[in-house]
Every structure is written in structure tokens, then in C-alpha cells.
Image: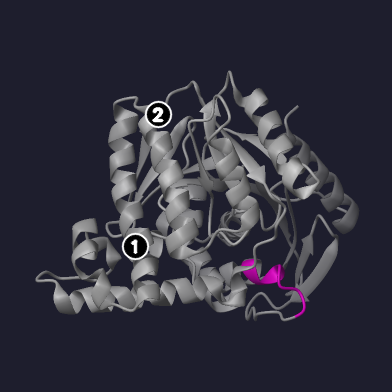
């Protein structure tokens, strides 16, 4: 029995013990791994990501009264609120992701009843696997089913993003929610965040990804994420004044454009903008490499991506750098980079199913030699997207 099924069983048991009845609806949303395309989503660029085999379950039933009862199944902490007017909580920050999604779904309708809800997942918090988006998407699917609200995938992704912005205080893009919703087994998700087209890209069945969790908790609400986004927006405005073409976002700026004009910006803004501009080109090159089964070339792009994160965007950390640098000398490793917003969390390593166990042991030892304790590793498979069970 795999870990995801265990999580569901544990949630159902906890739910029935807590509320004295079984849930009417259970939904599931996977986390995501970002393979190429770091911080490109809010720059209207490209990303290669995947839904993964770890995620969050959300169980819910209607109440006869008008109260919303929400329980975090891991810590068994409760929040009670008005489902008609959900408001951000300063005391229970975890509840804001759910409240924000509910607020978006019921913006044009009034819930006729309350609910009993509980969620539980196996995505480590702050690991860079997008536990917040998995919670947003799983709760959104459950609420839509409970209240009879019709919502398409892209609309639900935007509701989750709005919850991040207005309830959690982080100006994230759409990557995490889209990856969770559009995932497909044995495929990466190619996202175009200008046209909002999302396509599956097949990857060799021999390939395996290894997530190495540093256990360094990243907290994006401290302003670091928002500062990077503001720098990108400033750079786009600059390029719109010097390039003889429309520039709505950094997606419109080529690497050649950056080389020609970067010394006319302040040094920090120039470096910040170099990252998403280079990432867009790496994603497009990477898609062609996958089509040609050039796995070694694709892996090199992953290493280049991490170096740009480290130098240009400065959203890595010493622990992630240790893993990625060490991975370059481990037999069987094709590529490695940080995954997600950065500032902690996990590194994603591209290897083969044949080599994954040996690679995992080597990287855990490399990390332990530097920090005195082994990092956590998980074998990641590309999985189907979110759904109601």
C-alpha cells in the first residue's frame, strides 16, 4: 500500500472520530515539482513541471447550521468561521489558503449551509513541493462539489492564486495550481503563462526524479519573493523603453536583448531579470531535447538553471547549493536544481530508475558530511492531476 492511500485512510479515520460521521465528499490534489522555468510564470513565460505522487486529501460534509468547521488533520487544530464571509486569520495562517479559496468560489453566491471539513497530506511543509497549492486545489474541488458550483480548471487555479495574494500575502504566479490540476501520468506539464495553454510532454520511462529535502523551511511571506517579482516588473518596464517592440513582460525579452542593454540598468535589477529571461530559453530548448531523447543535454540545462538561481536571482541557500554541487559528481545523475520558489526547501535531481537508490544514498551522505544529518529523499513520479474521488 503506497503512502498516498495511507494518508487517505488516516484522514477518513480522523474525520469520523472528530465529526462522528463519514465525509460526503473527498478530493485529492497532488503537489508539484518544477523541472525547468523558475519564476517565469508571473513573467508570462514558460515552465516545465509535473504533478507528483504526493499530495493532500480534503474531506467535507454539509452541516445543518451556518458554521464552517475546518480542521488541520496533522495537528488537529480547529478553526470555526462564517462561510458566507471568510476573512483572513492572523492566528491560524494555515486556514487562510482554504478560506481564500472559499471566498473566491462563493463571491457571486451565498452558501446555504456550513460544513465540517478536514485535510491531511504527505507533502512536507516548506519543502518546495507546493503543499499550499495542493491544499487550495483540493479544498476548491471539494467546495465546488459541496455547493454545486461549476468551475473550470484554469478558473480554479486563479482562485487559488488569489487566495495566496489576498489571504496569505504572497504574490505567487499560477504555476503551482496549474501543475496540480493539469498533471498527467508519465508526462511533464508544459505551461505557457501568456496564452494559458497547458500541454503534456512525454518523458522517457527510464527517467526518475529524486527530491532531496534540506529541511530548511522557506518562508516566502518575508518579502523575498515579492522583492524578486518587483525587480522583474521594473526590468520589464525598462526594456519596454529601449526595445523597438512591445514588451509587456520579461517573456518578450530575449537573451540577446539582455546582453545588449543590461549594463544600462542597475546591477541588481539586471541580474534579477537575467534569471527568468534565461529560464524561458532553457525551457524551450529543453522541450526539443526531450523530443530528441537528449537526456544529458536536458540535465545540463537543469544545472545551468540552478546556477542562475544561485548567482542571478539569489533564491538558493547553502544547503541547496551543497546538494546540487555534490550531484554533479555522483554517477547516474543527469541534472539537478532547486525546485520551487527557493530560499530553502528541496532540490530535484534527474536520474534513472536503475540508479536512483545509489544516487539517493550518495546525496544523503554528501549532505550529512557537510551538515551532520542526512537530507530526506523521495522518489518522484509524474502523476495525474487533482480530482474528486
x, y percent for residue 195: 27, 57
Residue 282 sits above or below residue 240 on the image: above
Give the number of marks. 2
Mark 1 and mark 2: Cα distance apart in space: 24 Å
Task: Using residue 177 as the reference point, say whether residue 54 is left or right of it.
Answer: right
- Spot occupied by residue 57 in the image (x, y as percentages of width and height): 68, 48
Quarter of the image with the C terminus is top right
Vertical relation: 233 (above or below) 363: below
Residue name at image x 84 percent, y 59 percent = 75
Query: In the rendered structure, which segment of residues is drawn in magenta?
Result: 91-97
Q: Quick one: quadrant of the N terminus?
A: top right
Q: Mark 1 points at which residue?
A: 274
Residue 95 picture quarter: bottom right
In front of the other: 13 or 32: 32
Residue nearest the viewer, comparing 36 with 141: 36
Compare residues 101 and 235 and report the one nearer the observer: 235
- Residue that carries the numbered disc 2 in the rendered image: 296
**Residue at horizontal 29%, vertical 60%?**
194
x and y percentages locating residue 33 in the rendered image: 53, 45
Give 10 or 294, whichever is nearer the viewer. Answer: 294
Mark 1, residues whose alpha carbon is within 10 Å: few (<14), some, or many (≥20)?
many
Dividing the picture into quadrants, the one containing residue 126 is bottom right
Q: Is residue 145 something one can see in this rendering?
A: yes
In the image, taking residue 34 as reference, residue 218 lies left or right, namely right
Residue 149 point in image, percent of width and height: 51, 61
Q: Measuring 63% from the left and 67% from the top, which residue is drawn there?
A: 97
Per the image, label 2 sits on a secondary structure element best described as: helix
Amino acid at each position: 500500500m503506497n503512502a498516498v492511500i495511507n494518508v487517505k485512510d488516516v484522514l477518513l479515520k480522523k474525520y469520523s472520530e472528530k465529526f462522528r460521521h463519514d465525509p460526503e465528499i473527498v478530493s485529492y490534489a497532488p503537489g508539484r515539482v518544477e523541472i525547468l522555468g523558475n519564476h517565469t510564470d508571473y513573467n508570462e513565460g514558460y515552465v516545465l513541471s509535473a504533478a507528483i505522487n504526493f499530495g493532500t486529501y480534503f474531506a467535507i460534509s454539509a452541516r445543518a447550521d451556518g458554521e464552517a468547521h475546518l480542521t488541520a488533520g496533522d495537528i488537529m487544530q480547529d478553526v470555526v468561521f462564517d462561510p458566507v464571509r471568510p476573512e483572513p486569520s492572523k492566528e491560524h495562517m494555515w486556514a487562510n489558503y482554504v478560506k481564500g479559496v472559499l471566498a473566491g468560489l462563493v463571491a457571486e453566491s451565498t452558501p446555504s449551509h456550513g460544513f465540517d471539513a478536514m485535510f491531511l497530506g504527505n507533502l512536507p511543509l516548506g519543502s518546495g513541493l507546493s503543499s499550499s497549492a495542493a491544499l487550495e486545489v483540493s479544498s476548491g474541488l471539494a467546495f465546488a462539489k459541496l455547493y454545486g458550483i461549476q468551475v473550470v480548471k484554469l478558473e480554479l487555479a486563479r482562485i487559488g492564486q488569489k487566495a495566496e495574494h489576498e489571504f496569505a500575502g504572497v504574490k505567487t504566479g499560477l504555476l503551482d495550481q496549474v501543475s496540480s490540476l493539469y498533471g498527467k501520468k508519465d508526462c511533464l506539464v508544459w505551461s505557457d503563462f501568456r496564452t494559458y495553454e497547458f500541454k503534456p510532454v512525454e518523458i522517457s520511462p527510464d527517467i526518475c526524479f529524486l527530491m532531496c529535502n534540506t529541511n530548511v523551511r522557506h518562508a516566502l511571506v518575508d518579502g523575498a519573493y515579492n522583492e524578486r517579482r518587483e525587480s522583474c516588473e521594473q526590468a520589464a518596464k525598462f526594456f519596454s523603453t529601449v526595445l523597438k517592440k512591445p514588451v509587456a513582460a520579461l517573456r518578450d525579452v530575449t537573451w540577446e536583448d539582455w546582453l545588449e542593454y543590461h549594463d544600462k540598468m542597475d546591477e541588481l535589477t539586471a541580474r534579477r531579470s537575467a534569471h527568468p529571461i534565461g529560464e524561458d530559453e532553457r525551457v524551450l530548448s529543453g522541450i526539443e531535447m526531450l523530443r530528441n531523447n537528449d537526456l544529458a543535454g536536458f540535465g545540463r540545462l537543469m544545472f545551468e538553471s540552478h546556477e542562475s538561481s544561485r548567482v542571478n536571482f539569489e533564491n538558493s541557500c547553502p544547503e541547496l547549493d551543497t546538494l546540487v554541487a555534490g550531484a554533479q559528481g555522483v554517477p547516474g545523475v543527469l541534472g539537478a536544481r532547486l525546485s520551487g520558489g527557493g530560499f530553502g526547501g528541496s532540490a530535484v535531481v534527474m536520474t534513472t530508475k536503475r540508479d536512483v537508490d545509489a544516487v539517493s544514498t550518495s546525496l544523503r551522505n554528501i549532505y550529512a558530511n557537510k551538515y551532520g544529518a542526512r537530507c530526506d529523499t523521495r522518489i518522484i513520479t509524474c502523476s495525474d492531476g487533482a480530482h474528486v474521488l
